[in-house]
Image: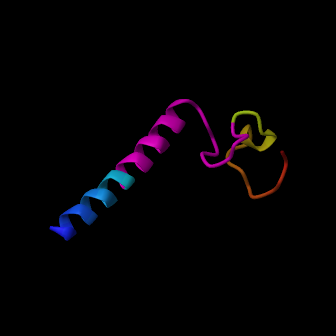
Amino acid sequence: MENIIIIAVVAVIVFLAAFYVYKAKKSGQKCIGCPHSKTCPSAKKGCCSGKKEH
């Protein structure tokens, strides 16, 4: 019974993460984890390259 609960919790977490990525990509965000992804200068070039250009 405990294994079913653990599997269900992991499945919910994976589903919510995938839904977040899908929703972010659909809204046009280039860098999903970046809080400045819609206004960042590097967002126009592609994805954040790790540089702090904010």
- Please state the horizontal and vertical placement of residue 23, each as a whole percent of the image: 48, 35
Residue 18 on the magenta segment: yes
Q: Nearer the viewer, residue 41 or 45?
A: 41
Residue at the outermost right position:
53
Which residue is rendered at x = 23% and y = 62% of the image?
A: 5
Which residue is rendered at x = 20% and y = 69% of the image?
A: 2
Report the quarter where the C terminus lies.
top right
Instruction: Give left or right: position of 53 versus 3.
Output: right
Instruction: Give left or right: position of 45 versus 9.
Output: right
Instruction: Give left or right: position of 7 versus 24.
Output: left
- Please state the horizontal and vertical placement of residue 12, each as a whole percent of the image: 33, 51
Residue at the outermost top position:
27
- Please state the horizontal and vertical placement of residue 39, each as a whole percent of the image: 76, 34
Which residue is rendered at x = 69% and y = 40% of the image?
A: 37
Q: Is residue 27 above or below residue 36?
A: above
Report the quarter where the N terminus lies.
bottom left
Q: Is residue 26 above or below residue 6?
A: above
Question: Which quarter of the figure has residue 38?
Answer: top right
Q: Nearer the viewer, residue 24 or 43?
A: 24
- The boundaries of the magenta stretch are 14-37
Q: Is residue 29 above or below residue 4?
A: above
